[in-house]
Amino acid sequence: MTHVTQAPLGKAPATLAPTQPVSLRINGQDRTLHIAPWTTLLDALREYLDLTGTKKGCDHGQCGACTVLVDGRRVNSCLSLAVMQEGSEIQTIEGLGSEAQLSPLQQAFIDHDAFQCGYCTPGQICSAQGLINEGKATTEAEVRELMSGNLCRCGAYSNILSAVMEVVGNSKS
Amino acid sequence: MTLQTDYIGKPTNRVDGPAKVTGGAKYAAEYNVPNMLYGYVVSSPIAKGKITKIDAAPVLALAGVQQVFSHENVPHYAFFDRSYQDEIAPGGSPFRPLYDAEIKFSLQPVALVVADTFELARYAASVLYIEYEEVAHETKLSQHIDDAYEPGTGKTGYQPPKSRGNFGKGWKEGVAHVEAQFSHHAQHHNPMENFATTVEWLGDKYLNIYDKTQGAFNSQLLVTKIFGLSKEQARVVSKYTGGGFGSGLRPQYQLLLAVMASLELERSVRVSLTREQMFSFGHRPETMQHVALAAAADGSLTGINHFAVAETSQFEDFTENVVGWSGMLYDCKNVALGYRLAKLDVYTPLDMRAPGAASGSIALEIAMDEMAYAAGLDPLEFRIRNYSDRDQAQDLPYSSKALRKCYHEGAAKFGWEKRTAEPGSMRDGNLLVGWGMGGGVWDATTKPATVRASLDADGHLTVSSGTNEIGTGTYTIMTQIAAESMGLPIEAVTFVLGDTELPESPLQGGSWTAASVGNSVVEACAALGEKLLKQAQKMDSLAFKDVKIEDVQFANGQMRLRSDSTKAMVLRDVVQASGEGKIEAQNAKEKSKLAALKPPKYSMHAHNAVFVEVKVDPDLMTVHVTRVVNAVAAGRILNPKTARSQVLGSVVWGLGMALMEESVMDHRFGRYMNHSLAEYHVPVNADIHDIDVIFVNEEDDKVNPLGIKGIGEVGMLGVAGAVANAIYHATGKRVRDMPITVDKLL
Amino acid sequence: MNSFTFTQAAAVDAAVREKASHDGAAYIGGGTNLVDLMKENVARPTHLIGLKKLGLDTIENTPDGGLRLGALATNADTAYHPEVISRYPLLNQAILAGASPQLRNMATDAGNLMQRTRCYYFYDLATPCNKREPGTGCSAIGGYNRVCGILGTSDSCIATHPSDMCVALAALDTIVRVSGPNGERTIKFEDFHRLPGNHPERDNTLEPGELITGLDLPKKGFSENFSYLKLRDRSSYAFALVSVAAALELDGNTIKDARLALGGVAHKPWRDQAAEAMLVGQPATADTFRRVAAKVLENAKGYGENTFKIELAKRAIVRALKQATEMKEAVDTNAFLNSNP
């Protein structure tokens, strides 16, 4: 029989860092939050701003479900602290289009049935938007590789590829 | 004549697509109810032993921490095992979270810290001091083969696999023989959405429970039984589920923790599991299998022997059908099948996409390939020679079986006839090319379900049932069926699901939802049609006087006579004339329940044949699956677009199982060590190349009125085996231990 | 994740002072590894010093004909920088073989050097790990060590450095520029990361409080003959089982100069200068490459689950050198074309 101790670091916890005002520009709107530095951009969106379109799949940068655009570039919002993003222009899935006015990528994802459960989908679409902004992918092989930061457990990859290829093609012409 | 409102069989876009692509679709952890607390689960670092001390005081002293729940302070809401048994609980004593000091598996929940914010709960959980006494655990299946036992039948519904004939005799009759061992580790479902429950406290123990589940009613059942709540008090809502694959068939412990915390604190509470904690509950069990085949000179199988040992927990007997399929897929008189369980210090396994069959078919399909080589036959020709026209396991004819078409159409599309048999004989430049095939069989099940159809005075049809949408397209196909049944444009139909206040539906699993709920949608619409006819007959219209429902057709927004389509009434007008806001009807669940009691006259199954091309670098032994053709016979296809997606996903799952997926346990700790999406590898976009899906024509008027068989699982069968066979064809290396990672090929 | 305070530093010296004045302070660049480690409670800083406002994100030519990568330039900006593509394509390939586009957009070049191992046990507080908690033991030895090292390991630790970018930086003779409480200094890339020895808790040779400010690439970029070959368990978004950075300078078929470094096999990017010396003057043939590969792996040690890496590394070296010689595949800015058949 062995004795095992969990959280031996759990001496009397230190005082906690206070909340502070953090101003974020999200989907063209300025929002001020009162949060401690330990709030990630992802949790700020989902838990404090009710922007739940951005998904938490792993919380460790290993799945891409939390992808948003910061200054037009795709990033994993789970690995960024909200305080680090003051002054940045953040765009989430809610800012890309709406049911009444779908973005070309959103429409292409529907047309190509590029999702099933839908949970990875906002991250896929934000990632695809980032890929188009980057302009580095034109061939199928390139799109597959550069969309590989977004896992889809339903396995919709073939359809994601066709949806993205359609919009990549249109954005070139 | 095709009508404008004929939708069944059309590649309709998903009706829930706009919600899913805009972030509007809400999943369990996304109901941000007011004044909500966050619970964070503390997981056990040991696999077996007991908790000897919890010091919660320093954590409780943190401003904003509301409570630390553990076995020390959670009341025993229920005492009997039956209270903890959900709809599909296997035999045994279900795990009770935070019930006592005992540790039964690594990552077991041992405490729930509840705080004002997620971040605070997470921090407090990380510093909660707990002491354990660890005792020796057993997690290695290979060391428990001798203790393996035949699971009990009794109340659990488990049916042991049926042997027939005399395998020993068949073995002797054969001139070619194959005998081999197969194995794979545990696998975890890892849906993209982590398990989570948001409990909204409405006062007086009335709760709205937003749960990640594949069965809202199953979650409700468990909550009412354990916590002594009425169904009215425990409403469970699950409008979208971010992937299931079986993981949500049993309610997971975060549901019970969230409800408990809500009742204790009289507050709204959310509990979300972390990705690491997604490795703390049910999984596809590790199996070790033995297959022996014998064949006569003409290639006909004279004997099949398939034996499997699978892991289960110490507290429940999880069973799945691993070997039974080997007694029905190919024609053979002498079949010996065996299945045993070994108890380990792990959580109880759980159905995972094509449970049992996915594991068993790898062994069978690789062995079939080995036998084809042993018998000097092409693997496809060998399977065709052993084609089974009758289900020999149940001794019943098939309601339909178009597997032959799958073989022929799949092979033609793939170009199988160009295959040269010799391993290593096909090349693309420097790369070794391998072509392999496999296939499988899966149950076509229909379960009782209830559906309500309601037409309002604006002519809008709302059809509802408490089933789930896990990505299979339930919203869409049910909308299609309802629109066609009532002859309405699809825009005039809404399908509502995922709420225990709706008519009851079975769990979303087993590939039975399309058939079960779909046929019930037809029944509910038929019942609605009768009511509409009666109302029409009350109205001042001679056209429908004395007309029977069989003589009426619902099409293009109208009810009209089949004999004379000019005799028609607009449905909206019928409802308006009734003076009620709506006319509604529900199908009779009892009817389908009774039907289920009758002994089956037919064996009802879906089949597939899959052809795979791999390219292997001859030096580095890296494998790429460059082409897959999957031909599926699954009755009538309701929506070729969403059905194709189901099969595409199944292929991806099969490739994952073949090449990369495994939950690797360090037996010294009794703990899965790759408990993250970085190290539990599932395929990424770059792994997936050309996948062709063929739905062969298969008409079946016996399986159920709509003639549908379900598509969510059959597509996965044979894929992993076909990959293994293709790798053998490319390299001459026969790998029987999945996944086939590069180290096994060097 | 523990509680911490956060400041955005305005200048390098201010950042260095800030670090010195706070116990338990840490610098944060892109955060891709640190925030992950904080969520796992592996890293528990009490104060974070943000570096985003320091600038240091430019990529500029140096007077001696080299290229200076700002410490805070992102991996993506570096990989796609025209000078990197044209003059240091090996670096371009290595960066693009790592992580995902999202992570490369966040991660900084200095952060790439600072990332910690991906050993399963390092990340799991339920298991002993000398790197995480010195003196507790190495669980990977005798455990699930598929991802662990085969070269330069010790009885204390067999973890690997997970970077792809650093393998190319090692091959290219990069100089690391740092600022610290005692002023500025430079560190040869080879000397930057450590072998585990008895102190696996120390990944590198930075002194307390030192901050990386830039990476200097020398003039010679081997843009004619190079290859970054990465072998992993899936086609993308996975750490290397083995990776090889190979760069050659050829005179006809004779090797005039060579660089060879491996990833996924050691506690640091594994540059083998003895092997490079063996290559020089030899014909660029499979025979030569096989002899050199055998030499590189001569002292390799397998630990069971990872023993296959020895053979895999040999074959990967031969292939990478062959690719560098032949340059048959079109040199594409996307490395995957070279690593996938």
Image (cartoon, rainbow, N blue to C red):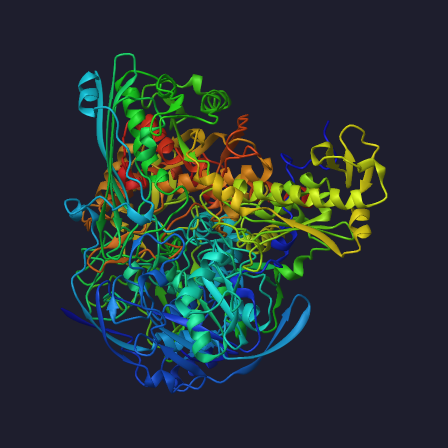
Nearer to me, B438 or C232? B438
Q: How many marks?
A: 0
Name the residue at the front extreme: B546
Q: Which residue is found at the position 32% from the left and 36% from the top? A: B360
Asked if residue B610 is positioned above or below residue C216 in the image, the reply reads above
Q: Where is residue B260 shown, x and y percent of the image? A: 42, 72
User: Which quarter of the picture shows residue C140?
Assistant: bottom left
Nearer to me, B662 or B332? B332
Asked if residue B689 is positioned above or below residue B731 in the image, the reply reads below
Q: Where is residue B13 shown, x and y percent of the image? A: 65, 43
Q: Where is residue B705 shown, x and y percent of the image? A: 57, 34
Nearer to me, B133 or B397? B397
Is B312 displayed left or right of B722 in the figure? left
User: Which quarter of the picture shows residue B674?
Assistant: bottom left
- Quarter of the N terminus of chain B within the rendering: top right
Asked if residue C325 is positioned above or below residue B103 in the image, the reply reads above
Residue B7 in sight here: yes
Is B66 displayed left or right of B82 in the figure? right
Q: Where is residue C159 shown, x and y percent of the image? A: 27, 58
Q: Which residue is found at the position 25% from the left and 61% from the top? A: C195
Nearer to me, B211 or B464? B464
Q: Which residue is found at the position 25% from the left and 15% from the top? A: B296
